[in-house]
Image: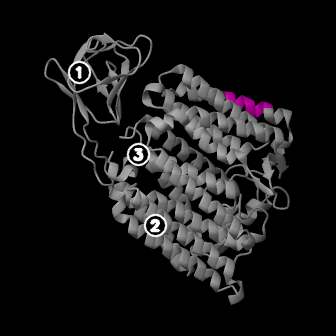
Amino acid sequence: MRYAAAALTLAITAVFALSLLLRKKRPSVWGRLELRDGTSLELKNRESLVGGSPSSDVCLTTSRRRVPEGVIERDGSGCKIHPIGKKSEISVNGTLIKKAAAAADGDVLTIGGAETVFKSAEVLPEKARAERSGGLYLLLVLALCGALFSSFCFVLKPSDFTPYAIGFGGAAAASVLLFIVNRAFGQGAFGVDAIGLTLSAIGMSVVLSSSPRSVYKELICLAAGIAIYIVLTLFLRSGAGVRALRRPIAILGLALIVFALLTAESILGAKNWIRIAGVSFQPSELVKIAFVFAGAAPLYSVFNKRNLIVFIAFSALCVGSLVLMSDFGTALVFFTAYLVTAFMRSGSFATVALSASGAGLAAVIAVTARPYIAVRFSSWGRAWELYNEGGYQQARTMTACASGGLFGLGAGKGWFKTVFAADTDMVFGLVSEELGLITAFSAVIMILLLAVYAAKSINGEKGGFYAIAACGAAAIMLAQLALNVFGSLDILPFTGVTFPFVSNGGTSLIASWGLLAFIKAGSASADGKRGG
């Protein structure tokens, strides 16, 4: 069955990768700007930057100024035009506007002195391509759950089957339920769901191998994560509703992380755990969802420097609080997501370089003020040399990866699970040993493919908010992936962050599903029957 598990994870990875390669962007023209000389400029993106600048989506060569003047947006009620900047020169039917204004078919829009006539076009809904392969994804995920359960059966007594049957049975039931919900609401893009389900199934194997008694907690967190995923994907369909809640959600996230800073207890050196009714969780994991909300913005808003400054301040408070909690790994994850989001919002390498320089200076100050931080990285690149000191875990991880080979020893048959943090921060070694390098690297590739999927949302039909949110969520996952895998293999300093979906940790699993919702929402195919 270890061969079957490797083949199935590889098959799911290949099908999703193939769908990305074959999926071609088919922008639909929803409107046109007709100039006096008869030139017709098409509006394809949901949000189109318009003005005399050559970098604009719609470049008006007759404009008096060579700068972006505004954003033309297609919304549910028709078309809106948003001026950007105090010097913007936009009028609708001769009336100069300073705020967003509606534009109807036949209205005269004068942009930077260039007179145009707006013409609307009918947008035909297109059924999502991803729905066709939804059934195949479901069968592959169910087969993977069966293969992993069967692999455990070879090392278990019949009397010990119960938690394993409940764990994989629950994962299979969740997969079927998510598929039904996906079809019922016509969301499409089930491949994204399948990636989350596949990684969660591998995570279930990790939990059952290292601590079978935690399976019930894992199932509850999986159900909670999928529930949040469903609610978010449906909620994100409403652009107006999402924008209205950006600020309250950001404030809630900031309040949560400050509360954790003041009241959290220290576990394994990081003061980022809150215990309520006997249940411990990490608030910083849930704040990741609020961070993505706070960073995302519609296209017309990214030109507002005040909004960017507010986001920079919000990010600084989040990262600073995590540093004070001594949770440096999560702080680095947040900072990476900030750099990606800040660049997408400003388009300025200078902004990113300045932020990176400031972070570097802060890191030097932190190491100087707290010397024990440097001690934590003293074994980096010297795992074998310092085997009996700081390099023990990394050396054991590399040994486990080598002993598992391509197909692994079989679920539950490995020795690495007895090593401290094998099911969390060093989970790549556990997966490699028991399920094989094929499965472990397939899990890595799945996260990389989700990042590619998110990148395809840039300049797509869903608009700037969804593109920035999708890329911000993908950046968080990629940062966690790199720090977890490379840290456990001694390629990067060990910082102690989780592998999305796979590591044993309820709050991390819930947050991973929440982030996945933003990645899915960035694609027009996620709207299914509603079209683009």
Secondary element at image label 2: helix
Secondary element at image label 3: loop
Which residue in the structure is indicated by mark 1? Answer: 107
For the residues labelled 2 and 1, the Cα–Cα distance comes to 50 Å
Residue lying at the far left of the rendered structure: 38
Up-down relation of residue 343 to residue 25 (above or below): above
Q: Measuring 57% from the left and 29% from the top, which residue is drawn there?
A: 352
Along the viewing direction, whichever of 100 and 456 lies nearer the viewer: 100
Q: Position of residue 92 (x, y in %)?
A: 29, 16
Q: Which residues are magenta?
A: 358-365
Upstream in the sequence, badge 3 or badge 2?
2
Upstream in the sequence, badge 2 or badge 1?
2
Which residue in the structure is indicated by mark 2? Answer: 12
Amino acid type at circle 3 is: Lys
Up-down relation of residue 125 to residue 93 (above or below): below
Do the numbered discs 3 and 2 sit on residues whose CB atoms are within 8 Å?
no
Please identify the dominant SS of the magenta region.
helix
For the residues labelled 1 and 3, the Cα–Cα distance comes to 33 Å
Tell me, for residue 456, which label it has, or none. Answer: 3
Q: Position of residue 421 (x, y in %)?
A: 76, 61
Amino acid type at circle 2 is: Ile
